[in-house]
Image: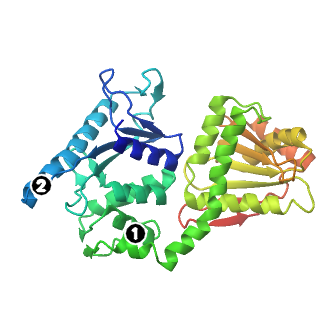
Amino acid sequence: MTPTEKFVSELCRSTFLSFWSFPNPIGKELGKELCDILVVCDPDIIIFSVKEIIVKDSGNYDIDAERWERKAINESVDQIYGAERILQFKEDILLKDKKTKLKLPKKETRNIYRVAVAFGRGERFSLKLGDFGKGFVHVFDERSIQIVLHELDTIADFIEFLKAKEDFVNKHIRHVVFSGEDYLAMYLHNRFSVPNDVDLLIMDGEYWSSFSKSEEYLKEKTENKISYIWDGLIERLTADFETQNLINIISREELEIALRFMNKERRIDRRQMSKLLMEVLDSNIEKPKVKARIISSELENSPLYVIMVRPHDDREFGRKELHLRCLVARSLNRDKNIVIGIGTDPYQKGKGHSLDLTYMNLTQWSDVQQKEAEQIKNELGYFKSPVTTRLKSNDKSTTPDG
C-alpha cells in the first residue's frame, strides 16, 4: 500500500470506523488487488481507486493536463470498472490476508458507488467526473476527499451525498464547480439535497471556504457534538465485549450485527439518540430507578432500539428486564423485526458505569409471542404507557409518540 493509499484507507476507517473499509482486497487472480479500498455495508458497495500523479510543467498546459488526467483519473476509472466487472460474478471476496472471505450483499439488492481519488493536481488541472462509459464515477482530490469524509463521517451520510451529487450531475443542469468541497457546501446549504430549480449554477471555488465559516454551518457543528456519544457507545460496547465485561450472553456474530445497525445511523439521528440517552441518564441521578425509552425510525429496515437505565447495583436483574422490555417493544411495533437493547446505569465515582447489549431478530413473530409479550407488559408494567421517539426520515427531526 502506497502512502497515498494508506492515507485514504485510514481516512475511511476513521470515518466509517473499522466495520466497513477493507484495503487492497484480492481480485480475480490471487495476489492481484481488486481495488485500493472496498467499502461494504449491505446493500451498498463503494469501490475506491487512489492514484498520485505528479506531472512536471513542460510549458504546454494542454499536454500536461491530458497526461495528468489520463494517469490520475482515467486509470482509476479503468480499475474501478474492472473491479465492478469482477464483483458481478462474486458472492464474496478474498481480503488482503488471502485467508478471510468477506460476504458481499446479494446481487439483486446491492448498490455500487465508484470513487476515484486523484492526488497531485494542485491548482493546475480541472477535476473531471461523471459517466466515463460504464457508470458514474465520483472524482475527488486530496483536499476534497478529506473534507467530505470528515464532514460526512457516517456511512449513511456519505452514501446519501454520493447519490445526491450523481443525481445533480445527471440532471444536466449547466454548472461550473471548481472543487469537490463546493459540491459538499451546496449539498449542506440546501439541507442535504441539491437544487432542482436552476438552469445555470456557477461556483467560484470559494463556496466551501465561505460556507464553512457561516453561522449556519457553525451552529450545525455545535449541535452535532452530542452525537458522538453514540459513536463512543459503539466503541465502548466493542471494547467491553473483547474484555468480557458484557453480562449478556451474546455471540460475536450477534454483536457485529447489532453494532453494524448502530453504525448505519445518520449523524442527525445519532444526535437525537444521544440526547435521549442523556435525558434518561440525567433524570435518573437524583432518584435512581429503572427508566426505559423506545426509539423507532421510519427508515426502511431500521431496527427498534430500547434504551434502559437502571440503578447501579441491579445489573443482573436489569439484564433480564432489558430482555423482556425488548419483547414488549416488539409487540408494540409490529412493523419492526430487529430489536436492539442497550442497558446502562448512571456514572458513580469509584464505580464508573456499565453497558449491556441485547440483539433480537424477531422476524418470525407469532400470535403466541404477541400474547406472551402483552402478558409481560400487563403483569410487570413494562411500557404500559410507552414513550416512543420516532426518528423522521423526511425532515430529519424527532417527535414523541406517547
Residue 189 lies, with reference to residue 85, above or below; the image says below
Q: Residue 245, located in which quarter of the rendered image? A: top right
Say which residue label 2 marks.
Answer: 64
Residue lying at the far bottom of the rendered structure: 215
Residue 328 lies, with reference to residue 126, above or below; the image says above
Q: Which residue shows up at 91% across the image and 63% down it?
A: 286
Q: In this image, 369 relative to 96: left or right?
A: right
In the rendered image, residue 313, in percent from the top left (x then y), is placed at: 92, 45
Tell me the element at label 2: helix
Q: Residue 169, located in which quarter of the rendered image? A: bottom left
Residue depth check, mark 2 versus mark 1: number of the one nearer the observer: 2
Disc with the residue nearer the chain's start (2 vs 1): 2
Tell me the element at label 1: helix
Say which residue label 1 marks.
Answer: 185
- Pick whichever, 183 or 321, lies toward us: 183
Q: Residue 142, located in which quarter of the rendered image? A: bottom left
Residue 5 visible in the picture: yes
Residue 161 lies, with reference to residue 7, above or below; the image says below
In the rendered image, residue 59, in percent from the top left (x then y), is placed at: 7, 60
Name the quadrant of the N terminus: top left
Residue 388 visible in the picture: no
- Pick whichever, 318 or 212, lies toward us: 212
Classed neighbour count for the residue bearing mark 1: other residues with Cα under 10 Å, few (<14), some (14–19), many (≥20): many
Q: In this image, 321 relative to 192: left or right?
A: right
Measure how far apart labels 2 and 1 are at the Cα level: 29 Å
Q: Which residue shows up at 87% across the image and 47% down it?
A: 351
- Pick whichever, 238 or 65, lies toward us: 65
Q: Which residue shows up at 32% across the image and 27% down it?
A: 27
